[in-house]
Amino acid sequence: MPTKFYRLRLLIAGLLIAVPVCGSSSAAQTSRSPQSSGSSTTVVIDAGHGGHDSGGIPGQKVPEKEMTLDVAQRLKSILTANGYRVVMTRDSDVFVPLPTRVAIANSYPNAIFVCIHFNSAKRAGADGIETYFYSRDSLPLASAIHYFVAGGAPSPNRGVRRRGYYVLRKTSVPAVLVECGFLTNPTEATYALSASYREKLAEEIAAGVRGRFSVTSGLSPTRVATGESIPLQSYTDQTNVRDSERSRSKRSHKKSSSSKSSKKKKSSKSIESKSSATPKEGEG
Ligand SMILES: [Zn+2]
């Protein structure tokens, strides 16, 4: 009898221990589900360029600033419908300085920051989708957005890249910059000029935002049918890319960020031309 009673007590004790463990793990899962994160997360959408800054390179036929704004506004509609609070750094054809864009993102502690750009290069053949991040906290978001955009677009996959762009380096919240194809590439420019394609891009970016907690370290080369498991993307670290301009600015990188910001302000559009000017950036 005493032995049986002891066993029963052990069983009850075991159950009591097991219950809170299960409870907490399921609670953690619930709080991480895309549905519940929608209402509590602010998505700051940053349409690249604007106003006097058209983006792209001189002589480019399709203005980047118009394409980025259109995709950003479509993304806003989708995410708002999904229950996210959305803040736009610009919602019309105006120039917003990079520090202002960053300040907007940083004013929402629970935000994620999504910058939308299109690429350009002197070489018309350069093509593909690439996604940039800087802080390690931003990698899951970059992985998820890139997984969907590169997976949903007919363009080549140029991969996830780490680079210290001002808007990525200065944000204190997870921040990602997605390059939605090359407007200097005739095929990709034709895609971008189609409203249905821009809607598709917005849908894929939104899927990445919703799926950012589903990123796993397991390697799965293809899109999973359920879309539940998103592989952590391998990335190219370009923060230490050496070219004459970059290696010179690298030394004063940390100390002179403010002076660099004014320099970078002008080069908001050089985000693309810089990568296109350097063959080692991967457009070879
Ligand atoms: Zn751009």
Image (spheres, rainbow, N blue to C red):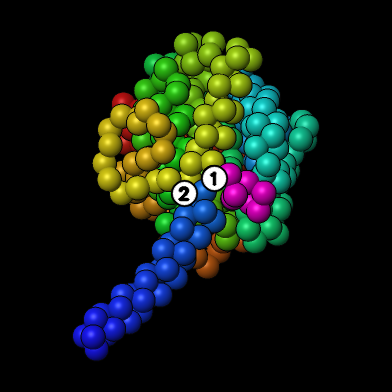
Q: Secondary structure at mark 2?
A: loop
For the question of whether residue 99 can be seen, the reply is no
Residue on which the image places disc 1: 34
Q: Amino acid at mark 2?
A: Phe
Indicate left or right for 45 with 188 as reference: right
Quadrant placement of the N terminus: bottom left
Residue 195: x percent and y percent?
63, 15
Q: Amino acid at mark 1?
A: Pro
Numbered label attached to residue 93:
none
Residue 228: x percent and y percent?
41, 38
- As displayed, is residue 244 above or below residue 271? below
Pick the front one: 190 or 15: 15
Residue at the spot 42% in from the left edge and 33% down from the top edge: 227
Residue 215: x percent and y percent?
40, 46
Indicate left or right for 154 with 1 as reference: right
Quadrant placement of the C terminus: top left
Residue 236: x percent and y percent?
33, 44
Q: Determine whether label 1 and label 2 are within 8 Å by CB.
A: yes
Residue at the spot 67% in from the left edge and 49% down from the top edge: 39
For the question of whether residue 4 can be seen, the reply is yes
